[in-house]
Amino acid sequence: MGLKQTGLGVLLLVLFGSCSAQLPKWRTPNPQHITGSGPVQHTGARLPVQDPVSGVLVNPEDPLSVQLKQVVQGQLKKLTWRFPQAPEKPQQPVVHFEPRQPVSTVSVAADCGQRSVYVEVKKDLFGTGELIDPSALSLGGCAVTGEDSAAQVLIFEAELQLCNSVLRTTAHELVYSFFLHYAPERLGGKPITRTSGATVGIECHYPRLHNVSSNALLPAWIPYASTVTAEERLVFSLRLMTDDWRYERPSNQYFLGDLINIEASVMQYKHVPLRIFVDSCVATATPDTNAAPRYSFIENHGCLVDAKLTGSKSHFLPRVHADKLQFQLEAFVFQQQSNDWMYLTCFLKATLASAPTDAMYKACSFTANRWTTADDDDRVCGCCDTSCGFRAEGLASPVAGPRWEGNLSVGPVRIGEKSPVWRRGGQN
């Protein structure tokens, strides 16, 4: 019996020791259970200590608490690197500019005979350098009867009673009226023309008691006026320029036959020289680039096709600076449009200035019946009559930096007409 009680006591002692081992090591000793004035000796559990550097309490037995936040000794160095900023557009000085006024040109003369009328019409009808198509010109429905190729003059000769003439009698005169009609066709099947339609009345006056005379009526012409704003996105710009290419053009009045100076540029970072290209350009009558009428005058990745399609003088100028590309577009208007506004939208691209030109990055003009480049190798223009490949939409530039492509527009632009002057026969 005594042996059993002894064994039970040992078992209870073992269980009590095991429970004591589970007590938390961070328990603060209760002062009521401490007797005596001497130092208290703790066995098993260790109290937290203060780190001499950070001042944080650390449990020496907890490995995670030993990884203290490092305190940097000494003074920190100030960061000098800054993210590069896009260059700011320089302020343009005040430019003294006087808008050009259309210069009238004598292009039609009429002589009235006793039985017939004789009319001469210059093929350069509006004095713009654009020769008209003889089939688009008629005198009261009568076609051209002759042509002086050397003088570039079209000739009409008809009896007074023909060509839908109208006879009017006054108290002192007999008046035969004719109408000279010019209705231009579309250029190259495109929805544009560089000469406007015109209807001019010609009258032959015959005094009943005097010699015959002729007189031509001056048509009324409505002048055009417009303003334009150049839009900039990121580092690209598209601007209308003055005749000397030094400044942005303060006035935006153009007339048929004028050459519109357009400059595309990229404002480059100093450490990344760039070269600008005009990939494509389209003219529309509204800001919507997909609306009709629509005329694409630069396409196929930099081919200025306007000169080939319409015989115009449009062309790229030889490149002087890699970050600028200049071209001239001969002014035109859309046919049969009540709204004469015109918007030009171009897709611009840039590459490293050190990269060579190729079929996808080029600036080609059609001059002297062949394709030439604004840069240094005409061979890149060999595909302008076929296909120069397809541009991968959304393809990022291989070089990190600012945006490398974008669509820009100038407009609205309105093109005015030059007024032809009609003179009486026998006058200079």
Image (spheres, rainbow, N blue to C red):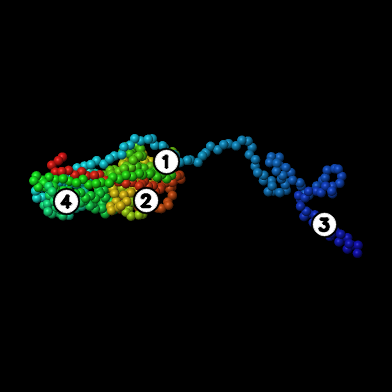
Which is nearer the eye, 192 or 399?
Answer: 192
Q: Which residue is mark 4?
A: 178
Q: Disc 4 vs disc 2: which is toward the camera?
A: 4
Q: Which residue is mark 1?
A: 268
Using the numbered discs, state the Cα–Cα distance from disc 3 to disc 2 in whole angstroms.
91 Å
Q: Position of residue 86 (x, y in %)?
A: 45, 41
Going from N to C along the chain, the mark reached first, 3 or 2, is: 3
Using the numbered discs, state the Cα–Cα distance from disc 2 to disc 1 in whole angstroms.
28 Å
Q: Which residue is mark 3?
A: 16
Using the numbered discs, state the Cα–Cα distance from disc 3 to disc 4 in whole angstroms.
132 Å
In the image, what residue type sits under mark 4? Phe
Tell me: 173 left or right of 398: left
In the image, what residue type sits under mark 3? Phe
Crowding near pointer 1: few (<14 within 10 Å), some, many (20+)?
some
* Quadrant placement of the C terminus: top left
Q: Quadrant of residue 270?
A: top left
